[in-house]
Amino acid sequence: MPKILVVEDEIHIQRLIKLVLEKQAYTVEAVGTGEDALEYLLKHEKPDLILLDIMMPGIDGLQVLRKIKGNADHRDIPVVMLTALAQENVVLQGIKLGAKDYIRKPFHPTELVKRLSKHLVAG
């Protein structure tokens, strides 16, 4: 059963994602800040995928992505960015830094599952 780490500061979005993904038999761990995500990666077994919000208090998603991709133990984890931003330059920056994909908020649950499963299979 693939494990997904959800990094999302808005608790209602975090809960929705968790509910949708757990219905698809994924194991889901959720944290609310970039700092918590980095701490999670140090203390727990590697997730199979990270769904990472861009806009968060403290360190943002792009900074977290830089740290993940700069760490030899974690750089191979597929990261999908979750963003309310429609700014193409921010999305392109995430892709340049190593994100596999991005999903815009608001999202449809079916789209979320389909896009994430694609990256879990592809690795």
Image (spheres, rainbow, N blue to C red):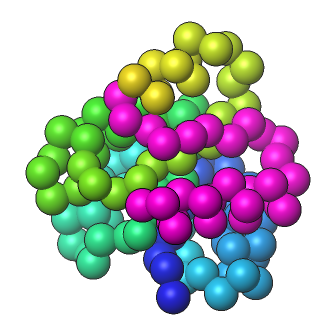
Q: Position of residue 71 (x, y in %)?
A: 16, 47
Direction from residue 107 to residue 43 in the image, left or right: left
Q: Position of residue 104 (x, y in %)?
A: 73, 37
Q: Position of residue 96 (x, y in %)?
A: 40, 23
Q: Residue 76, relative to residue 63: is it above or below?
A: below
The answer to whether residue 36 is visible is no
The answer to whether residue 75 is magenta is: no
Which residue occupies 45% across, 49% down? 79
The C terminus appears in which quarter of the rendering? bottom left
Direction from residue 80 to residue 41 in the image, left or right: left
Q: Residue 94, relative to residue 108: is it above or below?
A: above
Q: Residue 95, relative to residue 18: is it above or below?
A: above
Direction from residue 34 to residue 115 in the image, left or right: right
Which residue occupies 69% across, 74% down? 21
Magenta span covers which residues?
A: 97-123
**Residue found at the far left of this picture:** 72
Q: Nearer the viewer, residue 78 or 90?
A: 78
Which residue occupies 18% across, 39% down? 70
Q: Position of residue 109 (x, y in %)?
A: 83, 61
Q: Residue 73, relative to residue 107: is it above or below?
A: below
The answer to whether residue 104 is visible is yes
The answer to whether residue 121 is magenta is: yes
Which residue occupies 34% across, 48% down? 35
**Total marks in image:** 0
